[in-house]
Amino acid sequence: MIALLDTNIVIHREGIKGASQDIGLLFKWLDRCHYRKCVHTITIEEIKKKS
């Protein structure tokens, strides 16, 4: 299975302040269920801008 992650979720996950527990729990379940996490190329560009 594949999960397409929203830009906001990824930015919160990668942010300096750290992710909320809910986002961490989401990633934990995606990993447990062996989902492949995908993001749009624009999301990657947005993260690079924030760094």
Image: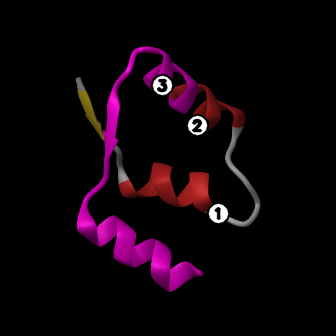
Q: Earlier in the sequence, mark 2 or mark 3?
A: 2
Q: Quadrant of the N terminus?
A: top left
Residue identified by numbered label 2: 23
The magenta-colored residue range is 27-51
Using the image as rendered, state which of residue 38 and residue 5 is in the foreground.
38
Q: Earlier in the sequence, mark 1 or mark 2?
A: 1
Q: CA distance from mark 1 to mark 2?
A: 12 Å
On screen, residue 50 versus residue 40, left or right, reads: right
Question: The residue under label 3 is which amino acid type?
Answer: Asp
Using the image as rendered, state which of residue 25 and residue 2 is in the foreground.
2
Q: Quadrant of the C terminus?
A: bottom right
Residue at position x 31%, y 53% from top? Answer: 39
Residue identified by numbered label 1: 15
Label 1: few (<14), some (14–19) or many (≥20) C-alpha neighbours in 10 Å: few
- In the rendered structure, find residue 41 and report the number of the disc placed on it: none
Most frequent secondary structure within the magenta stretch: helix
Label 3: few (<14), some (14–19) or many (≥20) C-alpha neighbours in 10 Å: few
- In the rendered structure, find residue 31 and report the number of the disc placed on it: 3
Residue at position x 52%, y 28% from top? Answer: 26
Q: CA distance from mark 2 to mark 3?
A: 12 Å
On screen, residue 5 versus residue 26, left or right, reads: left
On screen, residue 19 versus residue 45, left or right, reads: right
Q: Nearer the viewer, mark 3 or mark 1?
A: 3
Question: The residue under label 1 is which amino acid type?
Answer: Gly
